[in-house]
Structures are given as structure tokens and as C-alpha cells.
Amino acid sequence: MSIKEGGWDAGRVLQALGRIGYDPVSAILDIVDNSVSASASSVVIKVNTESEERTEGQRGRPRAILKSLVIVDNGWGMDEKGLDNALTLGSSAQLYHAETLSKFGMGLKSAAASLGKQLEVISRSENDLNNVRKVVLDQDLIVEKGKYVYNLTDPTDEDLNELDACTDGKSGTLIRITKLFRESLPPTSEIIHGLETRAGVIYYYYLKGMVAGSKCLSLKIDDYDVVPVDPLFIDEIDTGNGDLDEHHWDGLRPKWITKPQSIQLDSTGGTWAQVEITQLPHPPSVERKDLMSRRDCRDHYLIEARNYGFYIYRNWRLISWADRLDFVPQDQDLYAFRGRLLINNDADDILNINVTKSRVHLSEIAQDQLKPEIQEAVKKSRTAWKTAYRVTVESLTQGPHDTANQELNRISLLQTDEDKRDESVAPAEERKELEKRRNKAVRTKPITPEDKQHVKEAGQRVLYVDTLDNNQLWERAHGPEEGVIVRVNSSHRFCRDILNAVSDNSNLLKVTDVLFYSIARGEYDLVYKSEKNDDEIEEIMVEYRERVGETLSDVIRRLNLTDFLVDV
Amino acid sequence: MKHSAELGLATVFDATIAKKNGFLYAIYGIVENQATLYVGQTRGRTGALGRLAQHLSDGNNNTYLQRLSNIYFYEEVPLEKIDLAAIRFTSKEIFQTDSQEYRKAVEHLVQLQLLNWLYERNLKVHIVSQTSSNAYGKLQNVQEEADRISGLLKPCILEFHQ
């Protein structure tokens, strides 16, 4: 057996590297990663344009077209060895620190190759401040020579001036990409807009100075100072009352769905991620309260179709924007759902990070851990959105619960009246017994002052309350004047998993209200009108409600709701 | 030092562990040098000990063994040693009824707290149980119970892991 060295075409490989899936913004920011890894506190991105060359007889004004892209930083810079390493395909990992943003040592070359044919690197190392070195990697030269070659040359005055504008004569690096692929690149304004809107989110932790061992980063795109943007808007969550109560949310402020939580990513228990999930405000509710316009709210919180899901940060740098991770379905009611996964490079192999560091694939263990948490969070987010919508819209119009309650209130008053009449014509002995049983039934389950108010003001007979004892789904209550009402446990799985899933079906909601009311009314009639011992009936009814509550929970737990209810 | 199992030694020091009571338990086990933890709850007639027996049996309810088998691809799980810590729920009615919902809410919160704690302590123990949250997790008494139980479990797990 003999070992033979395989051939490769450097020009074609470099071209192929430029086609591994970069968009211009992610390519430019991948180069910025090197600046951040080199401990830069200041990075400037310049998108340079020039006037289009005009051919004779061409009409119209000349357009501004892309001339070059420049990224200059005041990091520790590179000496000759460092430059050689930087231009090596698959540069050595030994020169990276533990929490580097690099992965395969391909970023600079492949990102530059996706933007243009020529890459210039001009650098002054902190170990050798007297020398500035320049290397030029040119695809045309590589094709001509048939080899992976680059030029070591002297920097021009323009190079030095441009470098020193950022480094002030100290260490730093300037990357310039020229011979741009103008035909395939989007318009300049689009690139700049993309950089401005994404960089603040991507480098949020660095721009805020929250990364241990790293300097607070200042990033400029031409003259624009990039401001840090937390896509979860955690700073706006109330510290006291920040947890999302999806059934009573007014939609006005961001809330926690899942506070920072550690999860395990592999079966050794040694690789971790942190997950956190928030709910952003509901723009129509914010507008209704005159806090800001719907549009301003959407702009401020980045609420739109492409922005909901998980933001995955690797070593505190965003690598995946609004990833739905197969667990967050496409749904307009989830536009305010924001999650974050924080991982470090220990998780690279488990999460299958690709060369552009923009896609991750969750391990089975990670999916196992995340799935129930995310599904629950999605449910909460959707319910909260609907709650806010209901509060906003139904305050202007009548909702299904209002309609049901109005009818039930009317019927309840009639029923109470009929009971009184029946009682009044009963034989004296029986009348006395009925009166005694009625008073006892009412006393045993009194209504609260709040319930009273709901009945008085809105004729509410079916009240959805936060929780009931021992996982009961419903319980009845009475007022001497108000008659029977029924409280329904919003925390029960039947409400959370079933009713919420069908909450768009107003007829079904009305029917359910009728059913709850009738069950409570029937129970009251049993205690009041039966000839059996009323204390025993009450005891049995309590146990019955608890058993029904648990049985129903158990059935729902065992149901595969995703298949059982379409569009859950 | 040999594992207690190798020595043929099994110890139980609480006489009520096999009684019908609400228990939150943690099974710490080692399979081929990998430390694992399973968090569960029960209110079966035979208490936490009875539930442990099910977990380690060949029957359908051996969820712990099933999880190990699924995660580490074993046909027969080579468990080297196990430890059990079982904490009785307080006598509050919600934890001692037939309804599992409150105990399940505590179980989930305890698992989350243990995950955060293992991460902070940098302990390589893989939690293999699957829990899920429910609405009762927001109740103060449920949260307090989860705090109490995880506070009691942590030193036990540290001891098992030494």
C-alpha cells in the first residue's frame, strides 16, 4: 500500500468556499467576529461606494456602486506568523482563545470569497508596534498560478491612514475586500440596512460589555453607532411582577415565560445550554392605552413574521436568528414569542454547528429537554396573545362569554323565581324543609364580594377563576339574591389545553359555558331538592368534582393533543 | 472503595418509605461510570420503595430503566449502583390527594432547580427523567414545596456523587 497526495485546485476551492451559504451581512459580520476575538474595543465597518462608470451615450445620472468593504479594528493585531495563520485555510485553533467566535479557521477566507475576489489584510501587532504588514489574497492570481498563494507587500499611505483612524497608532487590523461581486450583491443601501438592524442583536452582549474577559465593544457602520438590542427585551420586564399570567395579561409589557434555566445537551451531563423565554407586548393593546402606536410598538419590539422564535447565541454571539427549532409553529399569534439559547463552543459538535455558524441542529437529548418546556411556553404565549386580543377587541364588541352569560343570567333569574313559586305552594312541612335546605346550600357555598359584583354588573354566571382547590374543574357558589354561579378553574388542563385550543370557536365556548352552568345548577338542585341527606350529598359532590377533575386531567395528559385537535 | 451493591449491601432507614404517602424521590444511578439522576413522584400504596421496585423491575412501569436504555442504547442496563432519596410531601391536602397535578408541578420545579444547581456546581450528573410543567407550578405553596424538597435532595445527591 502506498499513500498518494491528492490534488486540489486552489482557485476552484476558494470560489466554492465563497458559496457555502453566506449572505453579505453575515459574511461581513463573520469578519467582525475576528476583530472581537482579537479583543478589539472598537470596530468600524465601512461600505465604500464610487460613481458608476458611464459609457458614452448612456442616459440618466450615474449610480453609486459598491467599491470596497472595509472592517478595521483596534484588536491585538497580527505579526507575520499571525497573518500567515489568518490566511491558512483551516487556520490553527491553537492561536484562538477558549471562547473564540471562530470554529473551523475558515471564516475570513470564505466570508471574503463570498463578497469579492480580493482580500487585503493590513495589521500592526501589539508585539511589534513599529511594523505594519500587509498581505493580499487575490483569486485571479491564485487561478493564474494554479496555487494557493498570497502577496506580502508594503502598506500604502492610504492603508496606514485608514488603519490609524481606528487604532490611533496602536495595534489593530484592517480588512479590505475589493473586486466585489457587484452583480450578485444586493444594493448598498440594503447591505447597510441589514447590518444596522442585525448587528445590535448579534453582538448584544459584547456591545453591552456583558462578556467576561472581553472589553465593551463599540461598533460603527460608517457613521452609525450600533446600539445593543436584546431581542427578548428583558430589561423592560418588571422586576416585581414579571411572570406572564396568560389568562389575565393586558398585553402592555414584556413578561417572563421561562426565567433563565439550565438544560443538558448530551448524555454525559457535561454540556449545557441556558434557555430563557419572554412574551413581548401586544401592539393593539399598547395602542389602545395610548402608550405608543401599533406600528411604533412593532418597530420597537421587532414584532414581525421573521423575528419570532429562538435566538441562539454561541459564546455570547448570535448564530441563529429567530430559529423555530421545529417546536415553535408558524402562527401569527406567536409573533410576540421570543426565546434564547445560550451555548458555548463545548456544544459545537453536539449541535452540529456549520461553517457559517448560522445553523444548529439540536441533539436528541437537547430536544428531549427542550420540547416540553417550549411546547408549554408556546401554549402560554398563544393564550396570552389571545387574552390581550380579547381584552382589546371584546371591550369594543361582545364576546362569546358575554353572550352566554347574558342568556344564562336571564335563565337563572327565571329558575330562581320558579323555585320560589314552587316552594311557596308546597305543603307547610315540605316548604320548611326546602327553605332549610336552600339556605344551607347557599350558606355552604357563598359567593365572594367580587363574584357579586360580576353578577350585578355583567350578569356573569360562569366565572373563569385562576385556580380551584384540589384540581377541581368547577365549583358552584350562591348568593342569597344572586342565585347560582359557577367558577371554572382556568389552571385545569381542560381549560389550558382544550378550551384554549378551540377558543376561536365562539359557539363552542358558549356551549361550554352553558354546560358548566347547568352542571352547577343541577348540583344545587340535588342538594336543595333531593330527599337524601344534604350533608352527605355535599360531601359526595366534593369528592365527585375532585375525581372528575383528576380523571379529566389524566385523560388529557394521555391524549396526543397535536393529533387530537387539529391546528393546536 | 467498592460500591455498596458490590458488597451486597442495601440500606433503608425510614420505616414509612413503603407506606402510602406522597413522595418526591430521586434515583441516583451509575451506568458504566456515567452518573444519572431520575426525579419522580408517587403516592402508590407501597410508597417510594414500591415505586423504586417498579423502576428496577422488568415490568411496564420501569421508567427509569427504560430511559437509561433509550438514552444509552442498552438492551440490558448495566446499573452499577443506585441510591434513592425520597422526601415525603407535606401533609397539605393538595399533595396527598389522588390528583397528581400538584405533585407533578412540584416534580417539574424540583427537576428544573436540580438542573440549575448541577450546572452551577459543575457536577456531571445526567438527569434522565422527563417532567412537564402545569399551571399549578405558579402556586406559592407548590413553589415552596419544591424549594423545600430540592433543598433536602441536594445534599443527598452530593453524598451519592462522591
Image (spheres, rainbow, N blue to C red):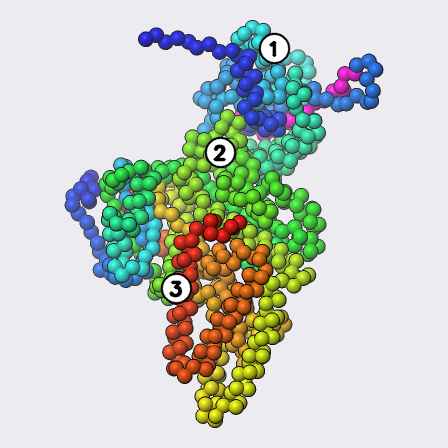
What is the number of the mark on residue A140? 1
Instruction: Give the CA distance from mark 3 to mark 2.
Output: 42 Å
Three-letter amino acid code of the residue under disc 1? Asp
Q: Is residue A11 left or right of residue B51?
A: right
Is the residue A2 above or below the residue A564 in the image?
A: above
Give the Cα distance between marks 3 and 1.
76 Å
Q: Are marks 3 and 2 on the same chain?
A: no
- Give residue A344's position: percent from left, percent from top: 46, 34
Q: Which mark is residue A360?
A: 2
Tell me which residue sits at (55%, 32%) in the image. Answer: A215
Residue at (54, 20) in percent of width and height: A17
Between residues A128 and B89, which one lies in front from this camera angle? B89
Labels 3, 1: one chain: no
Q: Residues within 10 Å of mark 3 (few under 14, many from 20)?
A: many
Q: Residue furthest top?
A: A145
Task: Work out whether A255 lies above or below A229.
Answer: below
Residue at position x 53%, y 83% in the image:
A419
Find residue A507 and report its image quarter: bottom right
Sequence-earlier tag: 1 or 2: 1
Total residue callouts? 3
Please give the name of the residue rendered at 46% of the width and 75% of the height, measured from the top-left corner. A523
Q: Secondary structure at mark 1?
A: helix
